[in-house]
C-alpha cells in the first residue's frame, strides 16, 4: 500500500508539470498573435514618365470593411508547428523570468512582439523598429532558394530573405496568382524583392503595381497584384510572337550573339512605332501592339535575349536633359556592353530618313555616359527612403562598337584620314548613307565645318577627284545626331 501511494504521488507531480508546460506554451503562442487593429494597406502605383519607377502609397486599413469580407474574417497563421526541445526550454525560461521579475523589457518590445533572434547573416534588423516573429517562408521543397542564374542581374544582388520573397512571388506569377501570403516579412525587403522581380521578369507585366497588407507598420503579411483577366492569353500571344521572331532569325542562319543582338535591335525598331499608349511601359506594347516608348523597347529586348540565353538586364536612369529613360546592358563573351534600341530608332532620334542608327548598340561606358545617367537607387515612396542600390558591371570594351567594326569611327580629328575614308567610299561607287562618327564634340564640329559647310568644303574636291568625267551638278545631303557626334552623308548627281 505504501509503494502504491508513493507512485500515485509521483504521477500527480508529473501531471502537474505537464499541465504547467502546456499552459505556458499556450500563453506564449497567444502573445505572438496579431490584432486586426494593426493591419495597414500599402499600395504601389507606377507614376510613369517614360520608365517604370515604383511609388508606394500608404493609407489606414479599414478594419470594418475587412471584417465584412466573408472570405477572410481573420488573419490566418501556419498551424503546422513542430515544437522543439529548445522552444520548450525558452518557454520555461520566459515563465520563470516572469515569475521572478516584473521588468521584462529585454524580452519583448513595447507592442508585445517577441524580439527577433534569427541568424544575423540571413536577416538584418533596423533600429527603432518592432521585431516580428521569425519569418516563415516556403521551404526549399516548395520554392527553390538556391538558384543562381547569371541572366537575373537583380535577383543575384538580393540577400537570403529577399530571395525567398522573390521566389515566392515568382512562383505565384507563374500560376497567375495575384494574392500572395507572407509571414511578417520586413517591408523594405519585400519592396526590394518586388522591384527586382519586376526588372528581371518583363513577362510578368502586371507586377509594376501592387498593394501590401502590413502589420506593425513594417511587416508584410500579403502582396496583392491586380492581374488582368486576359493575362494568360496575353502571355501565350507574346510567346507565340517571340517564337516567330526567333524562327525568322534562325532561318537567316544567325548564330553569333553579336548578330542575334543586332537582329533583335533592328526587329524592335523596324516593327515598333514610337509613341505613348496605355501599355507603353510593358513588353506587350512592342511584342503585341507595336507602339511603345523606351521602357517597352528595352523590356522587349530583354525578353528576346532571355529567350536566346543571352545575359541581359533592363536599366533605368536619365538622359542629359534629366528625363527618365530606360535601356539595356548585355554580355557578349567576357565583356559587357550598353544597348539603347530607342535611340537607334530614327523617329526618336529626329532623323529625316527611316534608316536605323547604331550609335548606342554595344557601346562602352565612355560612349553611353555622354548623354545617359544610371539611376542606381531602389526607389520607394518619399516617406520610406532606402539607401539600398543595385550595381552594374563596367562596360570598358570598345571592340564591338558598330562604327569601329565598320571603320567609320574616329577617335581623333585627322582630316587626311577622314578624306581617305570618303575617297575609298567614292572609288567603290558608294555615295549614299555614308556614316561617320567622332569621339568628341570638338572633332565633330571641325568635321562639319571643314568637310561640309565652309564656303569651299573638302567633300567636293574629293568627289571631283574620283568623278573626273562628270560635268553636272553635285548635291550633298547630310543628317546629324549631335548628341552622338554622328553624321550620315548622301551625294546626288544631276
Image: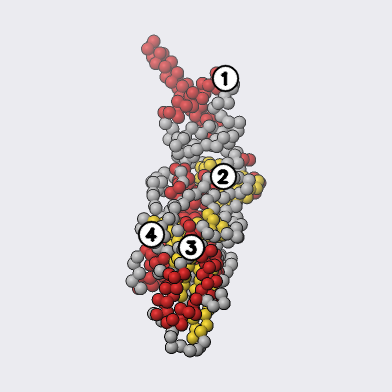
Of callouts 2 and 4, the N-terminal one: 4
Rendered location of residue 147, percent (x, y): 39, 49
Q: Which residue is mark 3?
A: 439
Q: Secondary structure at mark 4?
A: strand
Q: CA distance from mark 1 to mark 2?
A: 39 Å
- Can residue 236 be seen by looking at this rendering? no
- Can residue 97 be seen by looking at this rendering? yes
Q: In the rendered structure, are the residues bearing label 3 and label 2 in contact, judged by CB atoms less than 8 Å apart?
A: no
Q: Quadrant of residue 38?
A: top right
Q: CA distance from mark 2 to mark 4?
A: 33 Å
Q: In the rendered structure, are the residues bearing label 4 and label 1 in contact, judged by CB atoms less than 8 Å apart?
A: no
Q: Which residue is mark 2?
A: 386
Q: Secondary structure at mark 3?
A: loop
> In the rendered image, which quarter contains the N terminus?
top left
Q: Secondary structure at mark 2?
A: loop
Rendered location of residue 357, percent (x, y): 48, 70
Q: Is residue 461 above or below residue 105?
A: below
Q: Which residue is mark 4?
A: 332
Rendered location of residue 362, percent (x, y): 43, 62
Q: Nearer the viewer, residue 258 or 133?
A: 258
Q: Is residue 453 above or below residue 389?
A: below
Q: Quadrant of residue 30?
A: top right
Residue at 59% over, 45% down? 385
Which of the labelled discs sits on residue 101, or is there none? Answer: 1
Residue at 60% over, 33% down? 111
Q: CA distance from mark 3 to mark 1?
A: 75 Å
Q: Residues within 10 Å of mark 3 (few under 14, many from 20)?
A: some
**Which one is in front in this view, the residue at disc 4 or the one at disc 1?**
4
Residue at 57% over, 55% down? 53
Q: Residues within 10 Å of mark 2 (few under 14, many from 20)?
A: some
Amino acid at each position: 500500500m505504501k509503494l502504491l501511494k508513493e507512485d500515485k504521488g509521483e504521477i500527480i507531480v508529473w501531471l502537474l508539470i505537464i499541465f504547467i508546460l502546456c499552459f505556458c506554451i499556450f500563453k506564449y503562442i497567444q502573445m505572438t498573435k496579431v490584432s486586426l487593429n494593426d493591419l495597414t494597406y500599402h499600395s504601389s502605383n507606377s507614376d510613369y514618365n517614360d520608365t517604370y519607377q515604383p511609388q508606394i502609397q500608404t493609407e489606414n486599413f479599414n478594419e470594418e470593411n475587412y471584417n465584412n469580407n466573408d472570405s477572410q474574417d481573420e488573419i490566418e497563421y501556419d498551424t503546422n508547428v513542430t515544437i522543439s526541445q529548445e522552444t520548450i526550454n525558452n518557454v520555461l525560461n520566459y515563465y520563470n523570468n516572469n515569475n521572478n521579475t516584473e521588468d521584462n523589457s529585454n524580452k519583448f518590445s513595447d507592442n508585445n512582439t517577441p524580439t527577433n533572434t534569427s541568424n544575423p547573416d540571413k536577416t538584418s534588423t533596423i533600429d527603432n523598429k518592432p521585431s516580428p516573429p521569425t519569418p516563415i517562408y516556403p521551404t526549399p521543397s516548395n520554392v527553390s532558394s538556391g538558384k543562381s542564374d547569371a541572366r537575373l542581374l537583380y535577383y543575384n544582388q538580393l540577400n537570403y530573405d529577399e530571395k525567398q520573397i522573390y521566389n515566392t512571388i515568382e512562383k505565384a506569377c507563374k500560376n497567375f496568382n495575384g494574392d500572395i501570403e507572407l509571414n511578417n516579412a520586413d517591408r523594405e525587403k519585400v519592396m526590394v524583392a518586388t522591384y527586382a522581380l519586376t526588372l528581371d521578369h518583363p513577362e510578368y507585366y502586371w507586377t509594376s503595381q501592387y498593394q501590401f497588407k502590413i502589420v506593425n507598420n513594417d511587416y508584410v503579411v500579403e502582396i496583392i497584384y491586380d492581374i488582368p483577366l486576359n493575362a494568360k492569353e496575353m502571355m501565350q500571344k507574346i510567346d507565340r510572337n517571340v517564337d516567330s521572331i526567333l524562327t525568322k532569325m534562325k532561318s537567316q542562319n544567325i548564330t553569333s550573339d553579336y548578330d542575334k543582338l543586332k537582329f533583335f535591335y533592328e526587329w524592335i525598331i523596324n516593327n515598333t512605332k514610337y509613341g505613348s499608349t496605355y501599355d507603353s511601359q510593358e513588353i506587350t506594347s512592342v511584342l503585341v501592339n507595336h507602339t511603345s516608348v523606351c521602357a517597352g523597347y528595352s523590356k522587349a529586348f530583354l525578353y528576346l535575349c532571355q529567350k536566346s540565353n543571352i545575359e541581359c538586364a533592363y536599366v533605368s536612369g536619365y538622359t542629359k536633359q534629366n528625363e527618365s529613360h530606360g535601356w539595356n546592358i548585355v554580355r557578349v563573351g567576357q565583356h559587357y556592353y550598353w544597348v539603347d534600341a530607342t535611340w537607334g530608332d530614327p523617329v526618336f532620334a529626329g532623323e529625316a530618313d527611316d534608316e536605323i542608327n547604331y550609335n548606342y548598340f554595344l557601346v562602352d561606358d565612355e560612349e553611353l555616359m555622354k548623354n545617359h545617367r544610371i539611376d542606381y537607387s531602389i526607389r520607394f515612396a518619399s516617406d520610406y527612403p532606402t539607401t539600398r542600390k543595385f550595381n552594374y558591371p563596367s562596360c570598358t570594351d570598345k571592340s564591338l562598337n558598330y562604327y569601329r567594326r565598320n571603320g567609320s569611327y574616329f577617335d581623333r580629328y585627322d582630316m587626311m584620314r577622314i578624306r581617305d575614308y570618303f575617297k575609298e567610299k567614292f572609288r567603290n561607287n558608294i555615295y549614299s548613307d555614308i556614316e561617320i562618327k567622332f569621339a568628341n564634340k570638338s572633332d565633330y564640329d571641325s568635321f562639319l565645318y571643314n568637310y561640309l559647310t565652309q564656303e569651299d568644303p573638302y567633300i567636293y574636291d574629293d568627289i571631283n577627284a574620283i568623278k573626273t568625267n562628270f560635268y553636272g551638278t553635285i548635291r550633298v545631303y547630310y543628317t546629324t545626331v549631335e548628341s552622338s557626334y554622328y553624321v550620315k552623308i548622301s551625294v546626288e548627281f544631276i
